[in-house]
Image: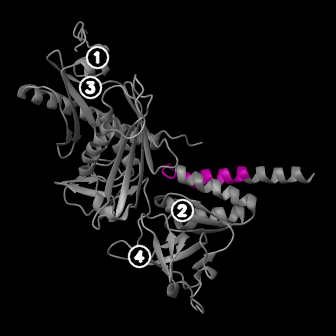
Amino acid sequence: MEFLVKDRSIVTPGMAIAKGPFRYEYGVDKFEDTIISSVLGIVYIENDGIRVVPLEGKYMPKTGDDVIGTIVSINPLSWDLDINAPYLANLHVQDALRYVKDTSNLERIFKVGDVIYANIKDVGESSDIVLQSKERPYGKLKWGRVVKIHATRVPRVIGKKGSMIKLLKQMTRCEIMVGQNGNIWIKGERQMEDIVERAILKIDKEAHIPGLTDRIKKYLKQKYQCNIRCYKWRKT
Amino acid sequence: MEKDIKFFTNGKRIDGRAIDELRNIKIEVGVFKRADGSSYIEWGGNKIYCAVYGPREAYPRFLQKSDRAILKCRYNMASFAVEERKRPGPSRRGVEIGKVTQGALEPALILENFPKCMIEVNIEVIQADAGTRCAGITAASVALANAGIPMKELVPACAAGKVEDKIVLDLCKEEDNYGQADLPLALLPRKNEFSLLQMDGDLTEDQLEEAIELGKKGCLQVHEIQKEALKKKYITEDVF
């Protein structure tokens, strides 16, 4: 067992990470007795395995994930949602609401373009995704806006024990919902929404550089003061 | 037909390179915002953009494979890319190069992860200066890595050829047009296999082996440049 790269360094596809028997997880491939990276990402070496977290790429749906999607089409008894994955997700009427009186016109419940917070119920053998939005936190998200980032950087938006998301919520008084697929929904005052959106895009861009929370804090403070100044100026 | 050119002066080639020297290569990663992955390569006088879309649902439907994704490659040359105006639109040559590009890249990708999907590679040649298919494959594999598509390894490509009975690496325009042979190669470095090998012109058996050996060395150099380019994007990105 021998490591060829440092922990938390950037690896390119085909780069050798370690030699010898090792349990390997996502983003890693085996060639003869060498473990090689299969994506462009950051390598995490833990005592029980090697994992490469990709820097780019689409969201791969997993059962149990909470996602935010947009409705793209209506079928006789279900909706198709775009959840940033390679495939469209399916939301059946029975899984959408707790009580459905009338299923003759689904457009009355959810229209094309509506934003839905849902849970992935199942990912089938042939990669068809089944969603459900019955229980309380799930359902349609009214007003607000959706920001799209890379699904691989969602943990950085949430932060350690939710520190980043807490910071964003406290400083801007916005409601924020984060989908595991990289869609983030924000609702609040319009100027604050702008600030949050920019901050989130900044996180997306600089996710791999350490000291992120401090930088975002600084950024938010700067923007916030700027905003207040503008507001005062407009009043006078 | 053959023009009267002196290919070698004092052991140097027309553009001042040694026999086994590559032209200058510069690769940029992530140049397009809308594409999932993209790259730009400058290889001597070649200027090529490459954009990758996907994985996304394969269209038309009948092309879908239920157990893996399909790879679609398109090669296009701008009408101003060459000396005489090239007629725009798909051509016999463009279709062929798209086909060989697909063949060169497919063994390196892990397509089984995305059943029923399609990955599109668009190679756009803005300026051509001999060896565009090699530069295109090099750029395309960097763009695929930038799109986050799982792959076994990057695919570097490079040409070797014969000029005045000497085997040279990475032909330039004059050598390509008036030389004796051209041998584009694409290498899978870890497997140590070639995924592209075409030959234009005549080579003896010994010369072919020599050219392949030289081309392989060139490919390995290109491979280093590819890795550097990908890493550079994330290390030196402006923080503030």
To which residue does mark 4 refer? A63
How far apart in space, not on screen, are marks 3 and 4 (Cα)?
Answer: 50 Å
**Residue B16, percent across and down?**
30, 13
- Give x and y (percent) for residue B232: 43, 39
The residue at which mark 2 appears reads as A159
State how far apart marks 1 and 2 are (Cα): 52 Å
Instruction: Give the structural element (helix, strand or loop) at label 3.
Output: loop
Residue at x 29% of width, y 68% of height: B66
Please identify the quarter of the rendering in which residue B125 is found. top left
Q: Check disc 3 and report the residue beneath it.
A: B170
> Residue at (50%, 67%) from the top-left corner?
A83
Q: Is residue A221 magenta?
A: yes
Whole-angstrom CA distance, mark 2 to mark 3, is 49 Å
* Three-letter code for the amino acid on which mark 1 is drawn: Arg
Residues marked 1 and 2, same chain: no
Residue at mark 1: B17
Whether labels 1 and 4 share one chain: no
- Report which quarter residue B55 is drawn in: bottom left
Disc 2: host chain: A
Give the dominant element type of the magenta stretch: helix, strand or loop: helix
Q: Chain of mark 1?
A: B
Instruction: Give the magenta part as a residue range.
Output: A207-223
Label 3 sits on what residue type?
Answer: Asp
Task: Name the front one of labels 3 and 4.
Answer: 3
Asked if residue B207 shows in the view, the reply is yes
Of helix, strand and loop, which one carries label 4?
loop
Mark 1 and mark 3 in contact? Answer it, CB < 8 Å: yes
Mark 2 packing: few (<14 Cα in 10 Å), some, or many (20+)?
some
Q: Earlier in the sequence, mark 4 or mark 2?
A: 4
